[in-house]
Amino acid sequence: MKELFSTLKKIIREGISWGLNFLCLGVIIQLLIDEKILGWDPVGNIQDAGASFIGVIALVVLYLLFMNKKK
């Protein structure tokens, strides 16, 4: 059972890492070309989220603090 949770935790960490990298890349590319990327508008989505995006930022910060504490 511990192996299952360990594997699941590893997969979730990798998924979050990939997702954050993909989001950051999308924002940077959209800022450079000033157009939507294949119909995806990451900057517009962040702007539309408004106050709820602060919660996402808080989760990312907590995640990064948790990861740094483990090292």
Image (tube, rainbow, N blue to C red):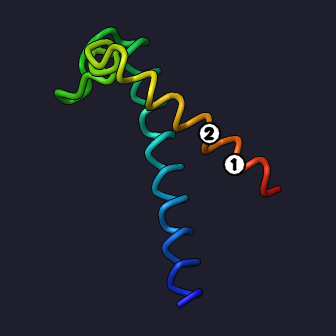
Q: Nearer the viewer, residue 58 or 15?
A: 58
x then y, percent, for residue 15: 46, 56
Q: Which residue is mark 2?
A: 62
Q: Position of residue 46 (x, y in %)?
A: 34, 19
- Residue 28 has which mark? none
Q: Quadrant of residue 63?
A: top right
Side (left or right) of 15 relative to 69? left
Q: What amino acid is at disc 1? A: Phe
**Labels 1 & 2 near each other (Cβ < 8 A):** yes
Q: Disc 1 to disc 2, how far (Cα)?
A: 6 Å
Name the residue located 50 percent from the left edge and 85 percent from the top edge: 4
Give the image location of residue 38, x and y in percent. Answer: 20, 30
In the rendered image, the quadrant that contains the C terminus is bottom right
Reply above or below: 31 against 13: above
Indicate the amino acid at tag 2.
Leu
Residue in the picture at 44% in, 28% down: 55
| Residue at the (25%, 22%) spot, across then down | 41
38 is higher (above) or lower (below) than 11? above
Question: Residue lying furthest right in this view?
Answer: 71
Left or right of 66? Residue 5 is left
User: Up-down: is 59 above or below 41?
Assistant: below
Q: Secondary structure at mark 2?
A: helix
Q: Badge 1, how many Cα within 10 Å: few under 14, some, many 20+?
A: few
Viewer-nearest residue: 16 or 2: 2
Q: Nearer the viewer, residue 25 or 2?
A: 2
Using the image, determine if residue 42 lies above or below residue 10: above
What SS does tag 1 mark?
helix
13 or 2, nearer to the observer: 2
The residue pinned by badge 1 equals 66
Number of residues whose C-alpha sits closer than 10 Å to that of mark 2, classed few (under 14), some (14–19) or many (20 or more): few
Q: Residue at x 33, y 14 (%)?
A: 50
